[in-house]
Amino acid sequence: MCLLVFAWLSHPRYRLVLAGNRDEFHDRPAAPLGWWTDVPGILAGRDLRAGGTWMGLSRSGRFGVVTNFRNVEAAAPEGSPSRGQLVPRYLGDDRATGPFVEELKTQQYLRAPVGVRYCLLVHGDQDALVPVDHAHRVYACALNPRRLEIIPGADHRLTDPAHRRRAVQASLEWIGRFV
């Protein structure tokens, strides 16, 4: 499972501190962080098998990241799109975010993980980007221990500080119990 941690306005010198772990096979070829020559303006590492990335930023100020559940027993269906294409497509798109969000709503990138253990899902019931139904479907495919924390009134970004506190508290409880 991937892990991404943000610290916003928590360091005296840096406004944003980001730490991440990409759960991937060790034999999967990847290029290190660098400016892409075929898609100008993108700074990211690169999956050399599928051509995408899991995290990057653009000269125009966009930041994109996608996380993943890895299940070695259930391969992706033949011909399904790589989620690693989401980030460079978003970073390289000069249009407003709206059309990209509408494309995500088609669910073409959704593949619910099957058989994942130790799964904590935190989701707002007012999320306009990822329907709460997605969280329920992922939860239904996960094995115990698992927890689904639906936060009433919360949007996709957990913009209300009370919603963020609830998400952090659920995460800390989960980490304290299983890590």
Image: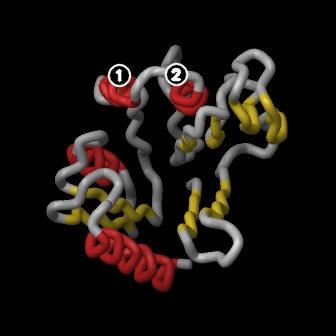
Q: CA distance from mark 1 to mark 2?
A: 10 Å
Q: Which mark is residue 88?
A: none
Number of marks present in the image shown: 2
Question: Which of pointers 1 and 2 lies earlier in the amino acid sequence?
Answer: 2
Check disc 2 and give the amino acid type.
Answer: Asp
Picture coordinates of residue 65 (x, y %)? 56, 43
Task: Tell me the quarter of the picture where residue 49 sits.
Answer: top right
Circle 2: element type:
loop
Q: Which mark is residue 99?
A: 1
Residue 132 vertical placement versus 148 (above, below):
above
Query: Which quarter of the figure is the C terminus placed in?
Result: bottom right
Residues 23 and 122: in front is 122
Mark 2, Cα crowd under 10 Å, few <14 / some 14-19 / many 20+, is: some
Residue 167 vertical placement versus 59 (above, below):
below
Compared across the picture, whether 143 is left or right of 135 comes to right
Residues 37 and 67: in front is 37
| Badge 1 vs badge 2, beta-carbon distance below 8 Å | yes
Q: Which mark is residue 93?
A: 2
Picture coordinates of residue 170 (x, y %)? 36, 76
Query: Which quarter of the figure is the N terminus placed in?
Result: bottom right
Mark 1, Cα crowd under 10 Å, few <14 / some 14-19 / many 20+, is: few
In the image, what residue occupies the spot 40% across and 30% down?
97
Check disc 1 and give the amino acid type.
Answer: Pro
